[in-house]
Image (spheres, rainbow, N blue to C red):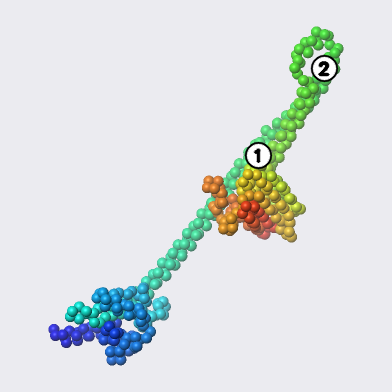
Amino acid sequence: MSAMAADALGSFIADRVEVGVFAVDLDFQITLWNRFMATHSRHAAADVLGKNLFECFPELPRNWMERKVRHVQALRNYAFTSWTQRPYLFRFDHNRPITGGVDAMRQNCTFLPVKNAVGEVEQVCVTVQDVTDTAIAQEQVERSLAALEREKAEQRKLIRQLEQANNQVMQSEKLASIGQLAAGVAHEINNPIGFVNSNLGSLAGYANELMTVLDAYTGIHDQLPAEVQATVAQQIDGIDLAYLRDDLADLIAESRDGLDRVKRIVQDLKDFSRMGETQTQPADLHHCLDSTLNVVANEIKYKADVVKCYGELPDIQCVASQLNQVFMNLLVNAAQAIDGRGTITITTGREGEQVFVAVRDTGSGIAPDKLNRIFDPFFTTKPVGTGTGLGLSVSYSIVERHGGRIAVDSTVGEGTEFTVWLPVRPPEPAAAA
């Protein structure tokens, strides 16, 4: 085939392939412009051949184009640019629907060196391939993947929330079980306390009668024969009857006082542990606080002095056992926040149709970056192994169910104050466990 025939064939092919083909010399004069380029640029070959590329198309990225051509010339090798790197070289319209998501034809560009007989690059041929369909499909896939990832993230969030809710339910069930166990133990303790207290009452009566008999025998001691007096003196030698008389009465009184204290603690434990209750009833918050303080006394007495600043409070509609749980969490947290020994101050009062209970400690305080997370399930500022991170979360839920709120004020190095606000009459429906 002659060179002329080969050139004609090449031009024929170049004009009929669905790929843009054009060439420029090293001065960027256009030397080839196929039908694809003429059709999409709306510039016929006769209008652009022999002219400068950038004068015909001033919108082209000139600096980038010049670097690309010089690069091909210097390396004498082809170069390729994907549409993902540069969406297009020529801003050609595309015939896809507007819903396709692209504003112009997406193009892959290949820069091919055209060499002379001695291997020097005289021209650079550029192919412009329409890959709009591929681009639209890929962008749709990316949008679908992004939507799927968002859905997965939402699912993971829902799963975490479900786990948190499940753990809170489990925690509530554990607390209910512990409360039922404590109530049962308190009930069983009441029985022996009852008969021991009754026996002590009888013992006190018997002791008084024995003292009366002893006084009668002591009164006739001097009237007894000498040998009888000697025998009695030998029997009671070393016994201080006066001390026994006084100490026996004191022992019985102290024992009965101790039993009364045990009865109060057991009653407070029963009041505190009424975990099965779900219906609201009128309750005295001061009584709730006092019974809770008795229950957690062992946690507090070695760490802090408790100062009560009780105001005037009406009875409020609530589930008392649940609020006892809230007060217990706040009081124990306050004690654990104190290094060494400090003070826990409990303040109560009423403002309009709301009452408040504030628990302030002189502990280490909470850092500002942690303050907005303290009510999150499983978040804790305590060392690993010393807290579950559920106490404040459960307390928050309980107060919220009562139509109230918890406010917190903390200063690092000075202490923290939690304030529980509760309506005198909670909104319907009644709070449930």
Residue for badge 2 = 217
Amino acid type at image mark 1: Ala
At 68% from the left and 57% from the top, the residue drawn is: 421
Circle 2 crowding by C-alpha within 10 Å: few under 14, some 14–19, many from 20? few
Which of the numbered marks, if any, corresponds to residue 186?
A: 1
Note whether 92 is above or below 364 in the view shown: below
How far, Cα to Cα, is label 2 from label 1?
46 Å
Comparing 182 with 301, the one in front is 301
Q: Could you tell me if residue 277 is visible in this image?
A: no
Q: Secondary structure at mark 1?
A: helix
Q: Secondary structure at mark 2?
A: helix
Please indicate whether residue 104 sits to the left or right of residue 49 in the image. right
Note whether 171 is above or below 58 in the view shown: above
Q: Nearer the viewer, mark 2 or mark 1?
A: 2
At 26% from the left and 86% from the top, the residue drawn is: 31
- In the picture, residue 38 is in which quadrant? bottom left
- Mark found first going from the N terminus, 2 or 1: 1
Residue 192: % across, % down: 67, 33
Note whether 100 is above or below 162 in the view shown: below
Residue 245: % across, % down: 78, 24
Circle 1 crowding by C-alpha within 10 Å: few under 14, some 14–19, many from 20? some
Which of the numbered marks, if any, corresponds to residue 112?
A: none
Residue 411: % across, % down: 63, 55
Comparing 157 with 358, the one in front is 358
Amino acid type at image mark 2: Tyr
At 69% from the left and 58% from the top, the residue drawn is: 423
Residue 362: % across, % down: 66, 50
At 71% from the left and 37% from the top, the residue drawn is: 261
